[in-house]
Image: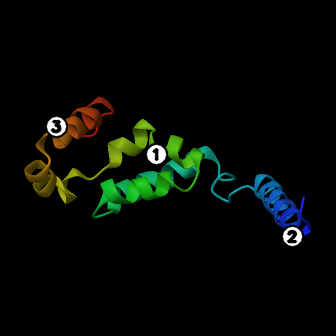
Amino acid sequence: MRTAFRDVVDDASTLMEARRRHRSSLAELPTDLAIKIASRLAATSERPMDDLPVLWATCRRMLRVCGEPEVGRRVALGWFTDDMSWDDPIGYATLIGHLTKVGNP
């Protein structure tokens, strides 16, 4: 194996190992606090259907947290009802069904 290539491979292995050892600060939050953060975002965001997926993408744990019924109950439908019901009526109906199941008023 060429020396330069071997150095790159070794550096990549070291980087991957370091990433495995370093946990995200989001992953270290207590679950109830992570749920409160996601719920607050869902309740106060003008675009919750855009902002929640950004939070999901940060780590697997936040993906699970955002799927908690407590977060779904806090999604403020008023922010996007008019646009979504007009632009994507099927998606809107699906969303309403999901939010109703988790107890969103």
Q: Classify residue 84 as left or right of residue 27.
A: left
For the residue labelled by badge 2, is the local secondary structure a helix, a strand or a loop? helix
Q: Residue at x 58, y 51 (%)?
A: 59
- CA separation, marks 2 and 3? 56 Å
Q: Position of residue 68 (x, y in %)?
A: 46, 38
In front of the other: label 2 or label 1?
2
Nearer to the camera, 30 or 92: 92
Residue 4, label in figure: 2
Three-letter amino acid code at disc 2? Answer: Ala
Location of residue 61 (image quadrant): top right
In this view, the residue farthest toward the top is 101
Location of residue 79 (image quadrant): bottom left
In this view, the residue farthest toward the front is 2
User: Total label count?
Assistant: 3
Three-letter amino acid code at disc 3? Answer: Ala
Instruction: For label 2, count other residues whose C-alpha is less than 10 Å away and answer few (under 14), some (14-19) or many (20+).
Output: few
Q: Position of residue 85 (x, y in %)?
A: 11, 48
- CA separation, marks 1 and 3? 20 Å
In front of the other: label 2 or label 3?
2
Q: In the rendered structure, which disc, 2 or 1, sits on the residue that comes first in sequence?
A: 2
Which residue bears the numbered disc 3?
Answer: 93
Residue 65 can be seen in this image: yes
Q: Do residues under tags 1 and 3 come within 8 Å of each other at their CB atoms? A: no
Which residue bears the numbered disc 1?
Answer: 66
Q: Classify residue 60 as left or right of residue 5.
A: left
Instruction: For label 3, count other residues whose C-alpha is less than 10 Å away and answer few (under 14), some (14-19) or many (20+).
Output: few
Q: In the rendered structure, which disc, 2 or 3, sits on the residue that comes first in sequence?
A: 2
For the residue labelled by badge 3, is the local secondary structure a helix, a strand or a loop? helix
